[in-house]
Amino acid sequence: MKGLSQFVEELAAMEVTQNVFNQYSYQLEENSIRRENLLIYLNQMYQLRPKVLLVGEAPGYRGCRLTGVPFTSEHLLMHNMDGLNLFGRENGYKLVSENTKLLKEATATIIWSTLIEHNLIALGWNAFPFHPHKKDNPASNRAPFKKELELGQKPLLQIIELFGIKKIIAVGNKAEENLNSLGISCDKVRHPAQGGKNEFVKGMKDLLSSI
């Protein structure tokens, strides 16, 4: 879909603040793979017509920062999970570098395991679509600042409009705050990171039982 291609191009062109990595930018040649991965994902989701949008906080350095796809890791992107046929080389996904040991990412694993358990495909996005990291340490994560969340509002609104999704679940406080500031109604679950797995799983179970 042309609108999705334009969306990815606009992400690539966005200027980011200090200590932020735009994994779609044209400044690095390897980002072309991440842009293509994201476009494959968005086109797949457009065909699947998901009923639910999960909005996280921001890409992590072991996950979307490497793959270009929200709530994924290198391992998940290449191998899927039992019960999931969305990813894999057979669907066109690629890695920036062919490592012998593919990185896993806990949040991505927990989220997709939970969705598979409920037989649900949900669209994933982040309140801030780029990777915020600590000063001089790109292999780290930090919470996005207010001005960064504001920068992420336009693509977040575009995702909601492009996919026409009515049911939105905020994964964590930052996502909820950003959605609320836009006047968008959402439910919230605990972020699964930092010991929040059980609360996330329970929260998702309660919400998804009504869908």
Image (spheres, helix red, strand yellow):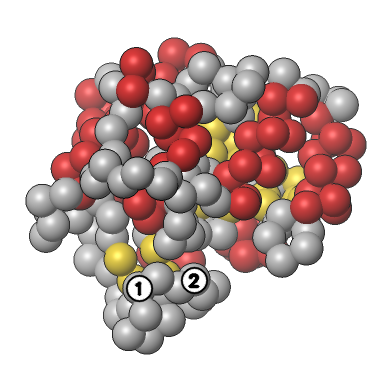
* Quadrant holding the N terminus: top left
Which of 200/105 is in front? 105
**Badge 1 vs badge 2, beta-carbon distance below 8 Å:** no
- Return the residue at label 2: 141
Q: Would residue 208 appear left or right of 87 to someone viewing this image?
A: right
Residue at the spot x=28%, y=33% of the render?
Answer: 94
- Return the residue at label 1: 138
Q: Is residue 11 visible?
A: yes
Which of 42/180 is in front? 42
CA separation in Å, label 1 and label 2: 8 Å
Residue 118: give x, y in percent of width and height: 77, 24
Residue at the spot x=13%, y=57% of the render?
Answer: 28
Check the image and report above or below for 29 versus 86. below
Task: Say which amino acid is labelled 2.
Answer: Asn
Residue at the spot x=68%, y=60% of the render?
Answer: 193
Outermost front residue: 100
Which of 132/91 is in front? 91
